Amino acid sequence: MMCLESDGAGTAGSSSQDCMPGAEDGGVETLSGRMSPVPPMLERKSPEIHKDNLDKDHVPNIKRANVAAAGILSVGNVLNYLDRYTVAGVLLDIQQHFGVKDSGAGLLQTVFICSFMVAAPIFGYLGDRFNRKVILSCGIFFWSAVTFSSSFIPKQYFWLLVLSRGLVGIGEASYSTIAPTIIGDLFTKNTRTLMLSVFYFAIPLGSGLGYITGSSVKQVAGDWRWALRVSPVLGMITGSLILIFVPIAKRGHVEQLKARSSWFRDMKALIKNRSYVFSSLATSTVSFATGALGMWIPLYLYRAQVVQKTVEPCNFGPCSNKDSLIFGAITCITGFLGVITGAGATKWCRLKTQRADPLVCAVGMLGSAIFICLVFVAAKSSSIAAYICIFAGETLLFSNWAITADMLMYVVIPTRRATAVALQSFTSHLLGDAGSPYLIGFISDLIQESTNKTPLWEFLSLGYALMLCPFVVVLGGMFFLATALYFLEDLAKAEQQEPCSDSFTVGSCSDSEEASIL
C-alpha cells in the first residue's frame, strides 16, 4: 500500500504511523516480503484519518522520542550560536587587550566563517552517507575543546586567536549542515515546519545569549577570557545527549536502497534547481546583513553614546557591556517573534497563494531594509529610537529563516538534502558573512584614515560602512521574488522524483494536497 498523503519528506516510521491509525510506536516500517499486507479496510480509511491528523497538527500525536530529539538538536544549535557571538559580546575588550583595529577585529568572524563554509560541503557529503549523530557529536566536542583552549592565548599571539576561531568554524559546520536534515526526516508537513521553526529560533536566541553571556560573565569575573569558557562545558554535555538520545533517522523513504546517486550528480541537480539557487542567493544576503550587524551594532551604538556624551570613552578594559546586553536581549526577543511571525504568516498565506513561502520571505526582507536604514538616522540623536528600529528590522529579517529551510525540504529530494544544506551554507557564507564583518571594518578604517581621528568620526565611519547592509537586504528580497517564479515547478519535479512504488517503505507517494496548500 502507498501513503496517499505523504510529502515524502518524513521517515518510513513516521509515514507508516500517520497512514495507519492502528500502528504502534516502532510499528510497520517496510512492506518487504516478510511482512503481512495491510487489510483492505484499513487501506481505505487511512488517508482520511491521516489528513485529519495533519490538519489539526497536534504535537502530542508525534512520537515523544522524535520531539525530544528535535529539542536536543535545537539546544545544540543554541550553543553553536552562543559560542559564535560570545566573541562579539566582548569585542571591545578583545580590541583593547590585543591592540587591534576594526579590520583586525572583523577578521575573527571572517576567518571563522571562511573555515565554516569550506568544511560545510565536506560534512554535507558525509551526512548523506554516514552516521549523522556521530558526526554531530564529534563536531561539538571538537569546537568545545578549541574554544576552551583559546581562552588561554597570551596577548602577543592574536594570530593564534584568529586560527582558533577558524578551527571552531570547522566544528560548527558539521552541526549546522546535518542537524536540519535529521529534523526534516523525523517530521513531515506542518509539523516539520513547526520543528524547523523551533530549531531556527535557536539562531537568534543563541546569538542573543552569546552577547549576554559574554558581557555578563566578563563583568562578574572581571576578565573577558572567562566568557569563552562557558559554552565549551555546555557543548560537551549536549554532545553526549545527542549520542544517547537522538535516533538514527532514516533519510527520507529511500534509506534502505542500495543505489545512491553520486556527489557530482547531486550537485548538477541542485544547480539546475532554480528555486534552490535563488533562495540560496537570498540566504547569502541575509547572512551578509546578520554577520555585519551582529558583529558591529553593539560597538556602533556604544560609539553613538560617546558622541551623545552619555558615556565616557573606554581606553582601558574592562569596558561598558550595556550595549551588548541590550542588543543580546533584543536579538533573543526578535528571534522568537520573527520565527513565529514568519511561520504563522506562511501558514495563513498558503490558503491564499501557492507561492506563499518565498513571497513571505520577500516581504520580510524588504520591510527589514527600511528599518535598518532608520537605525543609522536615529542613532546619532537617540539610542532608544535606534533600538526600536533594530527591534523592528531584526524581527522582519529573522522571519525568513525557518521558511527558507522548509522550502529547501520541499524542492529537494531527501537523499540530497544534507548536500543541499551544505551547498547553501557554503554559498551563503561565501557571499555573505565570510567577508561582511571584515569588509565593514575595513571600510570603517579607510574612512577614519582620511579624516580626523575623533569620537565623532569613529562613529560616523562605522555607520557609513554599515549602510551597505540595507542595500544588500533589498537585493535579497529580489532574489526571494525570483524564487517565487519557479517554486511550484521545482516542487512538482521533486515530488515526481520520489518513487511512489517504493517497495521498502510505507508512505512513498507525494501528496497532491500538500501542493494545493502551499
Image (cartoon, grey):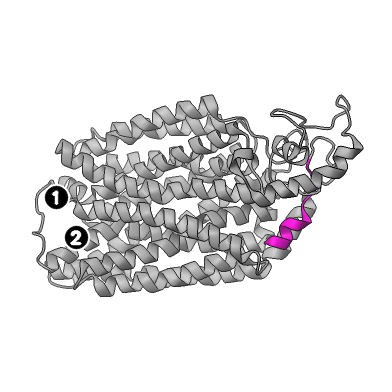
Q: Which portion, as a residue range, is magenta?
A: 507-518
Can the viewer see residue 157?
no
Under mark 1, the amino acid is Cys
- Alpha carbon of mark 2 to alpha carbon of mark 1: how far? 10 Å
Question: Is residue 285 shown left or right of residue 501?
Answer: left
- Which mark is drawn over residue 302? 2
- Residue 226 or residue 150, whichever sits in front: 226
Vertical side of 462 occupied by 137: above or below? above
Residue 508 x %, y %: 79, 44
Which of the two residues, 243 or 382, is positioned nearer the viewer here? 382
Secondary structure at numbered mark 2:
helix
Viewer-proximal residue, 484 or 431?
A: 484
Number of callouts: 2
Residue at (77% x, 30% y) in the render: 28
> How far across and down, in percent of the image, does residue 389 sit?
32, 68
Picture layout, residue 463 above or below residue 94: below
Q: Is residue 162 left or right of residue 32?
A: left
Pointer 2 with pointer 1, Cβ within 8 A = yes
Query: What crowding class fits label 1: few (fewer than 14 Cα within 10 Å), some (14-19), or many (20 or more)?
Result: some
Residue lying at 71% horizontally and 34% vertically, measured from the top left: 13
Q: Which residue is mark 1?
A: 319
In this rendering, position of residue 229 left or right of residue 478: left
Q: Is 416 situated above or below 432? A: above
Amino acid carrying mark 2 in the image: Tyr
The quadrant of the image that shows the C terminus is bottom right
